[in-house]
Amino acid sequence: MEQVPFTGGEKESLKAALDRHRDVVLWKLQGLDEEQVRKPMTASGTSLLGLTKHLAAVEYSWFCETFGRETEPLPIDESDPDADLRVGPDETTEEIVAFYRRARAAADGVIAELDLEARGTAWHGAAVTLRWVLIHLVEETARHAGHMDIVRELIDGATGDHVRD
């Protein structure tokens, strides 16, 4: 599990914090079958696989689209704000995990290439810096990793915020 360095630089520390939560997202899927990862566990329909799909779209959107980089087609529908949280019957865990890994790799490329003061344009039109996007994605990923912890506990009782060494 990635540790945030106690004396690291700002960009290094933000990236390590993001990676720590990204790793939890993937860890929460481990050891479960196809039915378990896609099973809606809340009244709103939250599933582990749906949260993973959402986070992949968020990574591509905030890091790549914001800074003018290409993405693959994203499961975003202006008329359906929860489209990226739902998993279709034709989508597999393997495909969604691969989508998440590709989004993470693309985002990592942007993070490595740009400095923290680099400016991009958010989906809503506001100018944002890479620093702001990193902070936002640490928050977003940590929030949903917490949701995944609760959903995983509801599925099989497993808990924890990171793999114990």
Image: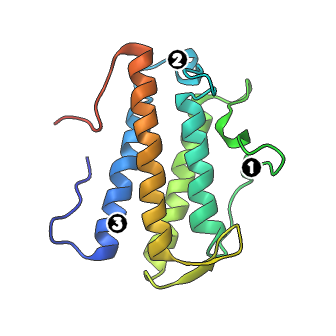
Give whichever of discs 2 and 3 has the lower sequence position: 3
Colour pattern: rainbow
In the foreground, 131 or 111:
131
User: Mark 3 sits on what residue?
Assistant: 14
Q: Residues within 10 Å of mark 3 (few under 14, many from 20)?
A: some
Instruction: Please report the residue visible at 68 percent of the width from the left and 31 percent of the height from the top.
Output: 87
Q: Residues within 10 Å of mark 2 (few under 14, many from 20)?
A: some
The amino acid at mark 1 is: Ile
Q: Are marks 2 and 3 in contact (CB under 8 Å)?
A: no
Image coordinates of residue 84 in percent, x first then y, are 68, 42
Whether 108 is drawn above or below 46: the answer is: below
The quadrant in which the C terminus is found is: top left
Whether 145 is drawn above or below 44: the answer is: below
In the foreground, 14 or 165:
14
Gap in angstroms between the C-alphas marked 2 and 1: 24 Å
User: Mark 2 sits on what residue?
Assistant: 36
Image coordinates of residue 103 in percent, x first then y, are 56, 54
Local SS, label 3: helix
Gap in angstroms between the C-alphas marked 2 and 3: 32 Å
The amino acid at mark 3 is: Leu
User: Mark 1 sits on what residue?
Assistant: 76
Image coordinates of residue 119 in percent, x first then y, are 56, 83
